[in-house]
Amino acid sequence: MKGEMEVTNAGWNFDNSYAKLPESFYSKIEPNPVRDPKLILFNEKLAESLGLDKEALQKEEGVAVFAGNETPEGALPLAQAYAGHQFGNFTMLGDGRAMMIGEQITPNGKRFDIQLKGSGRTPYSRGGDGRAALGPMLREYIISEAMHALGIRTTRSLAVVTTGEPVYRETALQGAILTRVAASHIRVGTFQYVAGKGDDVDELKELADYTIKRHYPYIKGEGGDRYLTLLKEVIKKQAELIAKWQLVGFIHGVMNTDNMTLSGETIDYGPCAFMDTFNMATVFSSIDTQGRYAYQNQPAIGAWNLARFAETLLPLLHDEQKEAIKIAEKEIGHFADFYYAHWLDGMRKKLGLYNEEKEDEKLFEDLLKLMQENEADYTNTFLSLTFDKEFEGTEELLKSAQFDEWKKRWNERLERQEKSKEDAHQLMKNNNPAVIPRNHRVEDALKAAVEQGDYSVMEKLLDALSNPYAHTKEQEAYCTLPEKVTPYVTYCGT
Ligand code: AMP
Ligand code: MG
C-alpha cells in the first residue's frame, strides 16, 4: 500500500502474471495522483462479478484507487509496450495514458486486467499528457456496456472518476479516468512489438505461450502446430466479433492493429459509433478521410490486421520462412469464410429463420440493397420486420414496391420452415435490439453530464441499453431518430 490513506482490501485479489514476462514487455510505473477525485459512474453488477466490495469501492478509499491516488495491496502498476499499424503505418506505441494496476482473480477463478485509462504520463506517452477528458471516458463507458448487453465480446467499464484537474485540448475540459476491465490487453500490436524487437524468438514464444495459457488453454502440443492453432483460434474469434459488429451496425472507427485484441474482445472506444441510416460506406471518424475503416471495410481490415499478426508468428510456424508464409497465408484465406458464416447465421436469426437455404444469401443482400437505396434506418428496419409495423426511418422503404416483393419472398421463406410464425417472431425479438446507443441520445446524455453535471439522462440511457432485447414500453422512446439529421463526426485522441 502506498499513499496516506488506509485502504481496506475491498475484494481486490491481484495476481500479476504479465509482470513475470520479459522486462522489455512493459514498464513499471508510479501512479500519478490527482487533485480531487469524484466518482461519477460505478458499475455495481460488474464489481460484484469481479468479487469486489461494491460499498467499499464507492467510499473515498475506493475512489482513490480508481483515481490512481492509492494502490491496493497486491497491485503492481505497469504500462504495457506495444506497436501497431495506425491507418496502415507502423508505429511504436504503448500505454501512453493507461496504467494496469493488476490482474483481478474473480471468485470463480477468472482473470481480468484492471486498467486505469487517463491516469497520467508513462514512458510511452510521447508528446501526450497521459490524461483523458470526461466526455470521451463517459462515452466509452456507455458504448462498451451497451456492447456487452448486446452480447458482443468487449472490454467492460467499472468506473469513471473526475480528477478535479483540467485537461487541455482545444479548450480546457474536465479530466477523468476510466477503469477498464479486459480479459487481457494483449493486442496484435503487442506481438508486432515483440516480433519487431529483433531476432529473439524465445521472447516471441513466451508471449505466444502466455497468450495461449490465458485465452486458449485448450491448445496443447508443441512446435509449429501449437502456434498455428493459436493463429486459427484468433482468426475465428475475430471473424465472429466483426460479424457481430456488422449485424448491429457498429463501426469501430480505428481498427488499427494496436486496437485488435488476441482475446477477441472489442477494445478502444474512440471514434466508434452505431449507424442510423444504412449505408455501407458510413464513416464517423474525423480523421478517417479515406474511409479506410468504413462499415463495409471492417471485415477486410480485420483480415489485413490478422495478416500482420500472422507475420509476427512466422518464426514459430516453420523453420523455413517460405513454408511458414504458405501456412500463414492459407489460414488468413479462411477468415472470409468464417466471417461470412457468422454473418449469415446472424442474419438468419434477425429474420426469424431457423434453418438454412441456399437462396438466403441473396435474400439478405437484396434487403440491404433496398435499405441503402431507400436510406432506411438499420436498427428500425429490423424492428419493423419483427413487429410488422412502421418504425421511424423506414417510411420510404416500406412504401416501395420492390420492398413489397422482397417481403413476399421472405414470407414464403418463413412458411417453408417448420417453425411457427410465433417461433420466428421470438427469434427476431432475441436478435434485433430494441435499443442501441444512438448517436443523438449519447450526445444528449454527455451534454447533460459534462455541461450541467446532470447524470440522470445518462442513467436512464444506460438502463435502457442494459437489456436491449427486452422490447419494453420505455425502450420505445429510444427508437426515435434525431429531429435534424446532421452528419455525425467522432474524434480520436481525446
Ligand atoms: P488510441 O487512439 O486511444 O488507440 O491511442 C493511440 C496511442 O496514443 C496509444 O499509444 C495511446 O496510449 C496514446 N495516447 C492517446 N492519447 C494520449 C494522451 N493524451 N497522452 C499520451 N498518450 C496518448
Ligand atoms: Mg488504442
Image (spheres, grey):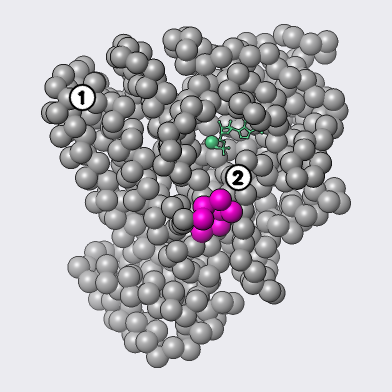
Q: Looking at the image, is 341 positioned above or below residue 364?
A: above
Residue 12 placement, left or right of 396: right
- Whether residue 285 appears in magenta in the rendering, the answer is yes
Residue 365 percent across, percent down from the top left: 32, 70
Overall secondary structure of the magenta section = loop
Vertical relation: 422 (above or below) 443: below
Camera-nearest residue between 421 and 83: 83
Chain-order first, disc 2 or disc 1: 1
Q: Residue 271 carries which label?
A: none
Type of amino acid under label 2: Cys
Q: Residue at x 19, y 18 (%)?
A: 223
- Would you identify the image quadrant in which residue 211 lies? top left
Q: Label for residue 492?
A: 2
In the rendered structure, the answer to whether residue 431 lies left or right of residue 123 reads left
Residue to which mark 1 is pinned: 317
Q: Give the range drawn in magenta.
A: 283-289
Quarter assignment of residue 28: top right
| Quarter of the rendering occupied by the N terminus | top right
337 on left or right of 477: left
Q: How far apart are marks 2 and 1 (CA)?
A: 36 Å
Does residue 349 belong to the magenta stretch?
no
Labels in figure, total = 2
From the viewer's perspective, tell me whether residue 37 is left or right of residue 484.
Answer: right
Q: Tell which tag, 2 or 1, sits nearer the viewer.
A: 2
- Mark 1: which amino acid? Leu
User: Mark 2 near ligand 1 (CB under 8 Å)?
Assistant: yes
